[in-house]
Image (spheres, helix red, strand yellow):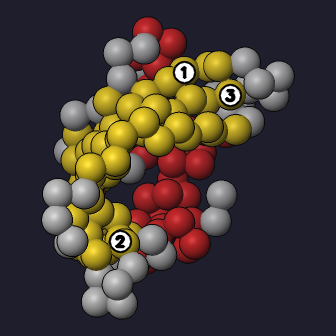
Amino acid sequence: MNADQVSAFWHFPCEISVFGKSRICQNQTELAAAILQSQSLYDAYDIAALRKNVCFVHVPDDGEALVCTQDKALDANDEVMGQWSCTYLMQKQQDNCWGLCKLKITTDDPAVLDQDVPNQAASLLSLS
């Protein structure tokens, strides 16, 4: 995962909320560091790939959009290890491109909750 490329899609300041805990990132450097930290969580659980399915998009006006996805973590054999939902708030920027400004991740998947992933993610990403 290229943290610099991923963080370039965001509008700052932005908020990340993972399993009920949040963090504000003021700039691309802070967000890229948080993304790199999350990679160690994937490595610790031997997650080989992530799959994202966009399941809902709502654009109430020209300047904002709400996007919901269903996400899955896969092992090396493409077996599902865990799943969660992401909700993104996006805003149109001055260059007329969309930028992410808020992310909320939730789950009720026992495979994720039973392994204490929410607390580990919160700790890694410095969420409070």
Q: Tell which tag, 2 or 3, sits nearer the viewer.
A: 2
Q: Residue at x 27, y 50 (%)?
A: 58
Label 2, on which residue? 99
| Disc 2 from disc 3: Cα separation | 27 Å
Q: Position of residue 119 (x, y in %)?
A: 35, 30
Earlier sequence position, callout 2 versus callout 3? 3
The quarter in which the N terminus is drawn is: bottom right
Q: Nearer the viewer, residue 65 or 116?
A: 65
At label 2, counting other C-alpha atoms closer than 10 Å, the crowd grade (few under 14, some 14-19, many 20 or more) is many
Which residue is most to the right? 77
Earlier sequence position, callout 2 versus callout 1? 1
**Mark 3 touches mark 1? (CB < 8 Å):** no
Q: Tell which tag, 2 or 1, sits nearer the viewer.
A: 2
Which residue is most to the left? 61
Label 3, on which residue? 74
Q: Amino acid at mark 2?
A: Gly
Helix, strand or loop at disc 1? strand
Label 1, on which residue? 82
| Disc 2 from disc 1: Cα separation | 27 Å
Q: Is residue 52 above or below residue 117?
A: below
Q: Amino acid at mark 1?
A: Gly
Horizontal arrangement in the rendering, residue 50 relative to residue 68 (left or right) = right
Earlier sequence position, callout 3 versus callout 1? 3
At label 3, counting other C-alpha atoms closer than 10 Å, the crowd grade (few under 14, some 14-19, many 20 or more) is some
Q: Residue at x 28, y 89 (%)?
A: 94
| Residue 93 numbered tag | none
Q: Position of residue 51 (x, y in %)?
A: 61, 37
Q: Is residue 103 above or below residue 105?
A: below
Q: Nearer the viewer, residue 35 or 82?
A: 82
Q: Amino acid at mark 3?
A: Leu
**Mark 2 touches mark 3? (CB < 8 Å):** no
The quarter in which the C terminus is drawn is: top left
